[in-house]
Image: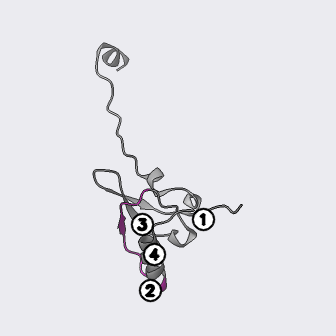
């Protein structure tokens, strides 16, 4: 049984390959958080949507094989309010 290939948005990969061929380094916007980072993407800045805005992510070699969504957090932590929080400060 063969292992499936990693998912990547075809349109995103095509745009990255076109930029590599032309030698360009501009920021790409994407909503595809589930796309896997491919070696062709290294050195590019991809703005990944976090549900509210696009977060710029500079792709390095260490990110290859991971998903784009891992680098754009969707939740922000606001400190818990209350008596304990004021005592800690």
Question: Residue at coordinates 45% horizontally, 75% vertically from top-left?
Answer: 16
What is the spatial separation of the Cα atoms under label 4 and label 2, in whole angstroms?
Answer: 10 Å
87 in relation to 24, above or below: above
- Count of residue discs: 4
Q: Report x, y in % for residue 68.
A: 46, 57
What is the spatial separation of the Cα atoms under label 1 and label 3, in whole angstroms?
Answer: 24 Å
* SS category of the residue bearing label 4: helix
Which mark is first along the chain, 3 or 4? 4
Q: Nearer the viewer, residue 4 or 72?
A: 4
Which mark is first along the chain, 2 or 1? 1
Q: Are marks 4 and 3 in contact (CB under 8 Å)?
A: no
Q: Answer with left or right where residue 5 lies relative to residue 48.
A: right
Provide the residue designation for mark 3. Answer: 45
Q: Where's the N terminus, which quadrant?
A: bottom right
Which mark is first along the chain, 2 or 4? 4
Provide the residue designation for mark 1. Answer: 5
Asked if the stretch drawn in magenta spans residue 25, the answer is yes
* SS category of the residue bearing label 2: helix
* SS category of the residue bearing label 1: loop
* SS category of the residue bearing label 3: strand
């Amino acid at each position: 049984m063969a292992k499936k290939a990693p998912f990547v948005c075809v349109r995103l990969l095509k745009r990255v390959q076109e930029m590599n061929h032309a030698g360009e380094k501009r920021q790409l916007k994407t909503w595809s958080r589930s796309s896997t980072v491919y070696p062709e993407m290294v050195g590019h800045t991809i703005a990944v949507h976090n549900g509210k805005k696009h977060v710029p992510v500079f792709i390095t070699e260490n990110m290859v094989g991971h998903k784009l969504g891992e680098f754009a957090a969707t939740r922000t932590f606001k400190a818990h309010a209350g008596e304990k929080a004021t005592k800690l400060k």
